[in-house]
Image (cartoon, helix red, strand yellow):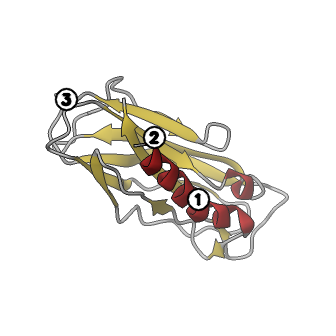
Amino acid sequence: MKRLLIAALVVLLVVTGGTFGYTYTTATATIDVSVVESDFASITAGEGPTAPTVFGRFTGIWPTGTLFTITPDPNYQGDLVIKVYLVNTGELIRYYHHCNMALEFKDDEGGTADEQGIFQCLNLHNAVVEFTWENDTGDSPFQVELTGGSFRLHHWKALTGGSAKPKIWCEITQR
């Protein structure tokens, strides 16, 4: 178990280490999602929402969509903790005045599967949200969904046809 944790940490550092090393700009504000394998559940990156085109001193809302689909292993009988990280806040803070994403953990029928039963806000000042799932709650597969939110570019950092792309990471651990 300890070796698996160390291997997962090394993979995390390799994948996210390069993320902080460069600024990625495109003609749209898109969201990258990343996953890592888990013994407790399988994670699939969703198609993600269709991103709006941004320019200049743009203010907008994030379109809704599924970021991750999570299917707990049928042999695992425990509870899970699902953490979602915004991994490139250092890069984003240079471009965005604010960047707020409302995330929810839902079951396959669209009901809340999170123990708290509320949405959580992923943003530049709170770059991790945590959902808890009790094994007997909801029907699989589950989704981490972007259900709303907004962003605004800095007034002094007018971008010409591009923006920094938020990069989102999902991790599942035992509770």
In the rendered image, the vertical position of residue 106 relative to residue 18, given as above or below: above
Q: Which residue is mark 1?
A: 166
Q: Residue at x 50, y 37 (%)?
A: 129
Q: In the image, what residue type sits under mark 3? A: Thr
Question: Based on the displayed image, in which of its 4 quarters is residue 116 positioned?
Answer: top left
Quarter of the image with the C terminus in it: top left
Instruction: Provide residue 152's location: percent of width, then percent of height.
Output: 67, 52
Mark 3 or mark 2: name the one nearer the start of the chain: 2
Viewer-side residue, 115 vs 157: 115
Viewer-side residue, 78 vs 166: 78
Q: In the image, what residue type sits under mark 2? A: Lys
139 horizontally vs 29: left or right: left
Q: Which residue is mark 3?
A: 137
Q: CA distance from mark 3 to mark 1?
A: 30 Å
Viewer-side residue, 131 vs 98: 131
Viewer-side residue, 70 vs 54: 70
Q: CA distance from mark 3 to mark 2?
A: 18 Å
Q: Secondary structure at mark 2?
A: strand
Local crowd at mark 2 within 10 Å, few (<14), some, or many (≥20)?
A: some
Q: Residue at x 44, y 56 (%)?
A: 63
Mark 3 or mark 1: name the one nearer the start of the chain: 3
Q: CA distance from mark 1 to mark 2?
A: 16 Å
Q: Which residue is mark 2?
A: 83
Instruction: Provide residue 102's location: percent of width, then percent of height.
Output: 47, 41
Give the farthest residue toward the right: 156
Instruction: Provide residue 109's location: percent of width, then percent of height.
Output: 16, 42
